[in-house]
Image: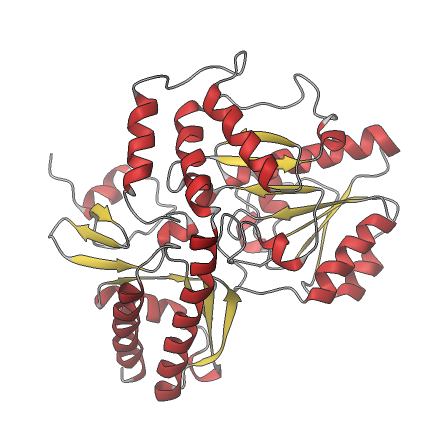
């Protein structure tokens, strides 16, 4: 069978519009397509390929577990899941872990837990969930409703109720919205899809304080910001603000699908036997790979390296902007960075994405006005410099178009 981009249009549901080229092989921070052309990867599978492509230790972990045990129902537990859960609780505020397959599933579990906790502790009136405009929490109907981008949730009929949104970094708006009926506030400690928006320290601490004041749970969605992305294992650690529930996925499996919800023992107790579940959650293959990811990433060498590589990106992007004057600011933290386009190039982020692909560079966008980078945390410095050179050529192409 000949596999071409045209085959996609014949056999796939049209909810995606993938690039013309089809990658067939990856190694480190580089990818090769069917024609043998090499691309530098600054996208990381949308902040997923945290250790690049085909990291030898992850390949070994998958092969080793693949010859032992692939799947069990949750009538049974398994060693990789228990080892991974122990390492996650040892490394974070959490005492209990629930495994799922994706960020959306982890967030769905977090929201259901928050509602159940509030119902059992305070009563049926306490059901309000507050989240933030431009936030993104997944594509299930519950999580997409809690997400603050209406374009993703409209057109599917009646939405789940009891969900309200306020502006990110607007503590006064949140204060006005919250009451004794609020069961949870859900936020990204660094907004990803919404434009790479960092919280102020005052805002992050203020949200924590308001949740305490109203007996509401604080849920941190660290699906994109977690697993070393900001230079800390989780972004909450850099903020010094501890959530009640944390969700993690994307980079947790280094490319193998896995998600997790982390929380305390007292909160977790409200998800009693039978109240929630997942056929594949805690899958031995996924957990074996994720355990190896965590072992590698949660080291001073990798986490400090993220901060060093962030500076290389910032310096290089500043040099590009000094020449071409296209960005109003460079946003983000660690290796989740966004180039916000200035007024002259407003709405044209996709043009920069396409121009980058033409220069054999894979990058991302975060809305119409932000070009986003989320590369491997261990991308070689030389690859950063080469990728930035390609990006500069792409910027020049857009500017001179």
Can you name the residue that lies furthest to the front here?
Answer: 300
Horizontal side, residue 147 vs residue 395: left or right: right
Q: How is the image coloured?
A: secondary structure
Percent across and percent down for residue 295 are 44, 40
* Residue in front for this viewpoint, 363 or 98: 98
Q: Is residue 202 above or below residue 1?
A: below
Q: Is residue 355 above or below residue 25?
A: below
Q: Is residue 37 above or below residue 185?
A: below
Percent across and percent down for residue 315 are 40, 77
Percent across and percent down for residue 297 are 44, 47
For the point 17% across and 51% down, which residue is it?
Answer: 33
For the point 48% across and 62% down, which residue is it?
Answer: 334
Can you name the residue that lies furthest to the top here?
Answer: 75
Is any atom of residue 109 visible in this view? yes
Horizontal side, residue 188 vs residue 42: left or right: right
For the point 77% across and 32% down, which residue is it?
Answer: 117
* Quarter containing the C terminus: bottom left
* Residue in front for this viewpoint, 154 or 94: 94
For the point 11% across and 39% down, which residue is it?
Answer: 2
The part of the image, by quadrant, that contains residue 125 is: top right
* Quarter containing the N terminus: top left
* Residue in front for this viewpoint, 113 or 57: 57
Is any atom of residue 335 visible in this view? no
Percent across and percent down for residue 290 are 44, 35
Horizontal side, residue 9 vs residue 135: left or right: left
Q: How many marks?
A: 0
């Amino acid at each position: 069978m000949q596999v071409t981009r045209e085959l996609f249009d014949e056999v796939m549901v049209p909810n995606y519009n993938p690039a013309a080229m089809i990658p067939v092989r990856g190694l480190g921070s580089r990818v090769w397509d069917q024609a043998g052309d090499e691309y530098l990867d600054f996208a990381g599978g949308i902040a997923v390929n945290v250790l690049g492509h085909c990291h030898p230790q992850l390949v070994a972990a998958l092969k080793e577990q693949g010859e032992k045990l692939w799947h069990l129902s949750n009538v049974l537990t398994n060693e990789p899941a228990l080892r991974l859960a122990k390492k996650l609780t040892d490394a974070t505020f959490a005492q209990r872990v629930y495994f799922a397959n994706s960020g959306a599933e982890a967030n769905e579990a977090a929201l259901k837990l928050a509602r159940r906790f509030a119902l059992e502790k305070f009563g049926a009136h306490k059901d309000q969930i507050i989240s933030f405009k431009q936030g993104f929490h997944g594509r299930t109907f519950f999580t997409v409703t809690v997400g603050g981008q209406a374009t993703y949730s409209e057109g599917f009929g009646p939405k789940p109720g009891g969900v309200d949104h306020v502006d990110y970094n607007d503590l006064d708006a949140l204060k006005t919205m919250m009451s004794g009926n609020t069961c949870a506030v859900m936020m990204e400690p660094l907004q990803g899809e919404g434009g790479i928006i960092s919280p102020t320290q005052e805002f992050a601490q203020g949200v924590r304080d308001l949740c305490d004041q109203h007996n509401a749970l604080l849920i941190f969605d660290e699906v994109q910001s977690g697993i070393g992305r900001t230079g800390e294992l989780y972004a909450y650690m850099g903020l010094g603000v501890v959530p009640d529930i944390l969700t993690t996925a994307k980079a947790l499996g280094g490319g193998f699908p896995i998600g997790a919800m982390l929380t305390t023992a007292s909160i977790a107790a409200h998800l009693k036997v039978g109240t929630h579940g997942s056929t594949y959650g805690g899958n031995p293959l996924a957990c074996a790979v994720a355990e190896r990811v965590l072992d590698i990433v949660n080291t001073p060498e990798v986490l400090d390296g993220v901060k060093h590589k962030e500076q290389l990106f910032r310096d290089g992007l500043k040099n590009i902007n000094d020449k071409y004057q296209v960005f109003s600011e460079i946003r983000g933290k660690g290796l989740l960075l966004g180039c916000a386009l200035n007024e002259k190039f407003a709405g044209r982020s996709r043009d920069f994405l396409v121009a980058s692909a033409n220069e054999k560079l894979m990058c991302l966008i975060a809305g119409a006005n932000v070009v986003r980078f989320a590369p491997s945390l261990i991308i070689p410095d030389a690859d950063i410099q080469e990728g930035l050179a390609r990006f500069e050529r792409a910027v020049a192409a857009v500017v001179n178009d």
